[in-house]
Image (cartoon, rainbow, N blue to C red):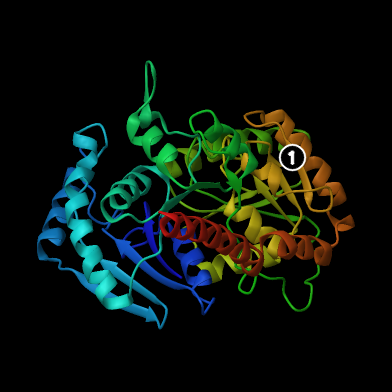
């Protein structure tokens, strides 16, 4: 079974976006009967943005000096790189129509290297699903889409009269659609003839795990959050909730990891709110540092205004930590009563109330139960099996269809 994977986001030297897609590919490659080829056109690396002209010029220079590359990661996993300049879909569909003939020709090289492709798996409807649709039509290979993005679809793909064809056409031409949460599936159903299959991303449970020996809690419980520092991630709501708690006399020890466009602004706001003695800004964290923060915290807070899933919740629960999260979409699928609870999003008072409750109840949560529930539902083995079932069903259907003609 040979699957060509098209990732709309893929980590590169300068940008980690799409790391969860890369992790899923690496995890699936542990299935020896599966052969995976990844087509990477540099969606994070060669994108041009008007608001960032200096970096765009650097990207053009890098693009002009780059070449097609073949990187064999494992016996059954190869990454094929075909550099291509892209930009906003508002202009000439982001230059993706120009990628179609290049990718179609490159598929010949992929098949010469790794054998006939049975299925295309696109991650996100545009651009990967759009490219997969055209490759499917040209090469007579079925394709599926895993949608990760929320809100679905992004504002960029909406019009005054509805949704752009670069979204609806791939959705309806695909053989199957996978949504990473039930909330996202409901959004997709409005625009597709398909009933989405709900398969979440898996957590890296071998890496994210509790310490072998529990550390003794300090007098003031340690609260951890890892997030992009932006308004959409609820950082402003979070700071206001912490201000409310501090005003009530609640003692706090909050550690916030991550960076983003709002980092400087929210750090200044934290100082103006008088939170400098109880909030520590950690900046960017590598995986090892993030693991350390998960392991030593007493509970985790996720204040976002909207999430299609939430990988940080998976990582925190894999470490056995109880959660206070906003009910902002995907988290509803991730947290049950044994793992924590949800509060209303964009409501600092509700978040403050939730944090105060958890400050008093976190010792009653069982770390082993939290982790066991995470493993049962979100382990790579469980998720890989479900994805492979979709692969097999689509390939069998199209094989039988061709044989019947």
Q: Nearer the viewer, residue 43 or 172?
A: 172
Q: Is residue 211 above or below residue 359?
A: below
Q: Nearer the viewer, residue 56 or 100?
A: 100
- In the picture, measured across the screen, residue 10 lies left or right of residue 325, that is left
- Where residue 26 sits: x, y (%)? 48, 71
- Where residue 272 sits: x, y (%)? 54, 35
Q: Say whether residue 360 is visible.
A: yes
Q: Say whether residue 276 is visible.
A: no
Q: Is residue 228 above or below residue 203?
A: above
Q: Secondary structure at mark 1?
A: strand
Q: Which residue corresponds to mark 1? A: 342
Tell me the residue at 46%/59% (across/down).
Answer: 21
Q: Quadrant of residue 377?
A: bottom right
- Where residue 189 sits: x, y (%)? 55, 33
Q: Is residue 232 above or below residue 284?
A: above
- In the picture, measured across the screen, residue 127 lies left or right of residue 242, that is left
């Amino acid at each position: 079974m040979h699957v060509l994977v098209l990732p709309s986001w893929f980590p590169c030297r300068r940008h980690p976006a799409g790391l969860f897609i890369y992790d899923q590919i690496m995890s699936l490659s542990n299935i020896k009967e599966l052969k995976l080829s990844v087509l990477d056109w540099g969606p994070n690396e060669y994108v041009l943005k008007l608001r960032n002209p200096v970096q765009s010029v650097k990207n053009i220079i890098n693009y002009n000096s780059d070449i097609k590359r073949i990187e064999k990661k494992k016996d059954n996993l190869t990454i094929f790189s075909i550099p291509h300049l892209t930009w906003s879909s508002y202009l000439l569909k982001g230059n993706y129509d120009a990628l179609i003939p290049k990718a179609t020709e490159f598929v010949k090289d992929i098949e010469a290297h790794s054998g006939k492709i049975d299925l295309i798996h696109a991650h996100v409807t545009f651009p990967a699903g759009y490219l997969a649709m055209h490759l499917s039509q040209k090469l007579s290979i079925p394709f599926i889409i895993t949608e990760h993005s929320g809100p679905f679809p992004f504002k960029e793909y909406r019009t005054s009269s509805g949704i752009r064809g670069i979204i609806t056409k791939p959705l309806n031409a695909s053989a199957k659609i996978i949504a990473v949460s039930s909330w996202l599936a409901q959004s997709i159903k409005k625009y597709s003839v398909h009933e989405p299959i709900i398969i979440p991303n898996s957590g890296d449970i071998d890496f994210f795990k509790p310490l072998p020996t529990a550390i003794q809690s300090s007098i003031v419980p340690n609260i951890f959050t890892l997030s992009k520092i932006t308004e959409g991630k609820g950082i402003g709501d979070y700071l206001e909730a912490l201000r409310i708690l501090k005003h009530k006399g609640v003692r706090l020890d909050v550690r916030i990891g991550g960076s983003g466009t709002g980092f400087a602004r929210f750090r200044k706001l934290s100082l103006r709110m008088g939170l400098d003695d109880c909030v520590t800004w950690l900046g960017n964290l590598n995986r090892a540092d993030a693991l350390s923060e998960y392991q030593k915290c007493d509970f985790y807070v996720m204040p976002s205004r909207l999430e299609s899933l939430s990988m940080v919740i998976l990582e925190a629960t894999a470490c056995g930590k109880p959660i206070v999260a906003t009910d902002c979409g995907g988290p509803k699928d991730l947290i049950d009563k044994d793992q924590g609870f949800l509060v209303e999003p964009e409501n600092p008072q509700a978040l403050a109330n939730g944090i105060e409750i958890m400050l008093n109840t976190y010792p009653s949560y069982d770390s082993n139960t939290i982790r066991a529930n995470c493993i049962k539902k979100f382990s790579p083995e469980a998720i890989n099996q479900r994805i492979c079932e979709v692969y097999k069903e689509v390939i069998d259907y199209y094989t039988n269809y061709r044989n019947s003609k």
